[in-house]
């Protein structure tokens, strides 16, 4: 059987290092793609953000390194720090890095 595991801490560190040299301060990798399930490691340097975008039917965000803010179009925000996990808002939202950060985004792209 093929080993399809990922060391999340190593992936977080690797993508943080890549984000620090990227002109946009970002690096990401899709690590699990199984039907409707997607998991991605996303790294952002302090002060960078992912612009507002639509939400999949279900999603959560786990902070592996650093501190981030999930912001909604209505202006609400939730701060998450390393070790914390929370749901992604159902409305349009963005993600801002309050410090150099790496997160695990888990999303279900279709509901059965």
Image (cartoon, grey):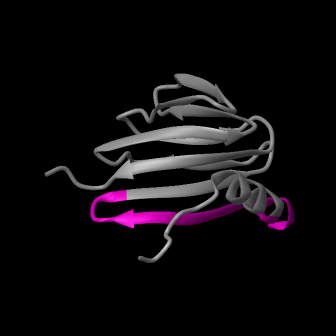
Is residue 58 within the magenta segment? no
The furthest residue to the bottom:
2
Residue 95 appears in the rendering: yes
Instruction: Please provide the residue range marked out in magenta.
Output: 18-37
Taking the image as shown, residue 84 lies to the left or right of residue 25, namely: left
In the depicted structure, whether residue 51 falls above or below residue 87: below
Compare residues 65 and 70 and report the one nearer the observer.
Answer: 65
Residue at (64, 58) in percent of width and height: 7
Residue 23 appears in the rendering: no
Is residue 27 within the magenta segment? yes
Figure quadrant of residue 42: bottom right
Taking the image as shown, residue 101 lies to the left or right of residue 91, namely: right
In the depicted structure, whether residue 82 falls above or below residue 32: above
Compare residues 90 and 105 and report the one nearer the observer.
Answer: 105
Q: Where in the figure is residue 94, as x and y percent of width and height?
A: 54, 42
Residue at (51, 48) in percent of width and height: 105
Compare residues 1 and 108 and report the one nearer the observer.
Answer: 1
In the depicted structure, whether residue 23 falls above or below residue 49: below
Residue at (62, 63) in percent of width and height: 28
Q: Where in the figure is residue 103, as x and y percent of width and height?
A: 62, 46
The furthest residue to the right:
21
Tag count? 0
Compare residues 91 and 66 and report the one nearer the observer.
Answer: 66
Q: Where in the figure is residue 63, as x and y percent of width and height?
A: 63, 38
Taking the image as shown, residue 43 lies to the left or right of residue 108, namely: right
């Amino acid at each position: 059987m093929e080993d399809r595991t990922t060391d999340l801490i190593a992936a977080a560190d690797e993508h943080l290092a890549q984000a620090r040299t990227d002109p946009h301060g970002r690096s990401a990798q899709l690590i699990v793609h199984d039907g409707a399930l997607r998991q991605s490691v996303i790294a952002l340097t302090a002060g960078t953000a992912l612009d507002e975008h639509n939400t999949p039917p279900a999603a959560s965000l786990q902070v592996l390194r650093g501190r981030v803010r999930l912001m909604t179009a209505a202006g609400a925000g939730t701060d998450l720090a390393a070790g914390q996990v929370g749901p992604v808002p159902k409305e349009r939202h963005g993600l801002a890095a309050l410090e150099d950060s790496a997160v695990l985004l888990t999303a279900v792209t279709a509901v059965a």
